[in-house]
Amino acid sequence: MEAVRFLSLASALLVLAVAGYLFATYTTTTTRQSTLNLQPGMTAELSLKNNPAESMTGHFQETSGRPVSFYIQTSAQFAAFQSGTSLGYIYGVTNAPSSDVSYTFSAQGPYYLTFTHGAGLVNSTETVYFQRTYTAHDSSRLWLGLVFLPIAALDLAYAFRRPRKMTTRTSTPSLE
């Protein structure tokens, strides 16, 4: 009987370790670096797909210290920008030679990170160094970890339950 308890305890610890690993790896970070050349009259854009609550932090710098503008745009805003009808964006830094950026995405979908020339610099080439870190959440790991917790609890409850007392039956002779 003690072997069964030991196996149940070992199983609970293994399941807890797997759940802990899933919780620890629920959030992932990815770092990207880009060097973008803004040719005269042109823009540079990077596309990405994000889920809600994912975030991006980073820093950009124009190598010669000239100002550039940075925008995060939805696909609809980017399409309007490309057609020349409007410059809409959900996050922006305008006319800065360098800046820190930070944004948490509120909806799932494709987004565009767009750089444009600074004021009065449309006819010059600008080079932008852009380093960013994306923080993403894998909800399947979270849910799977949550599923493993009750399984581990059941294993632990089984391993530490009170042993039943064995009762022995004694037969009494009948008086017939």
Image (tube, helix red, strand yellow):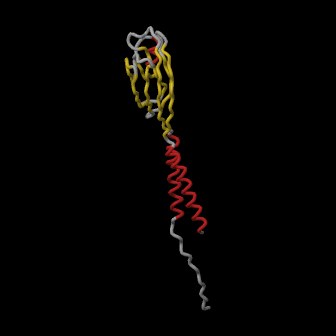
Where does the image place residue 2, in percent across and percent down from the top left? Answer: 59, 68
Where does the image place residue 149, in percent across and percent down from the top left? Answer: 50, 52
Instruction: Please name the residue shown 59% across and 81% down the image.
Output: 169
Where does the image place residue 110, in percent across and percent down from the top left? Answer: 49, 25
Q: Residue furthest front?
A: 64
Q: Residue furthest bottom?
A: 175
Quadrant showing the C terminus: bottom right
Quadrant housing residue 93? top left
Q: Is residue 148 visible?
A: yes
Where does the image place residue 1, in percent across and percent down from the top left? Answer: 60, 69
Frontmost residue, 5 versus 133: 133
Horizontal side, residue 68 vs residue 157: left or right: left
Horizontal side, residue 72 vs residue 155: left or right: left
Instruction: Please name the residue shown 55% across and 50% down the image.
Output: 18
Compared with 126, 130 (above or below) is: below
Compared with 76, 103 (above or below) is: below
Compared with 13, 39 (above or below) is: above
Frontmost residue, 24 versus 138: 24
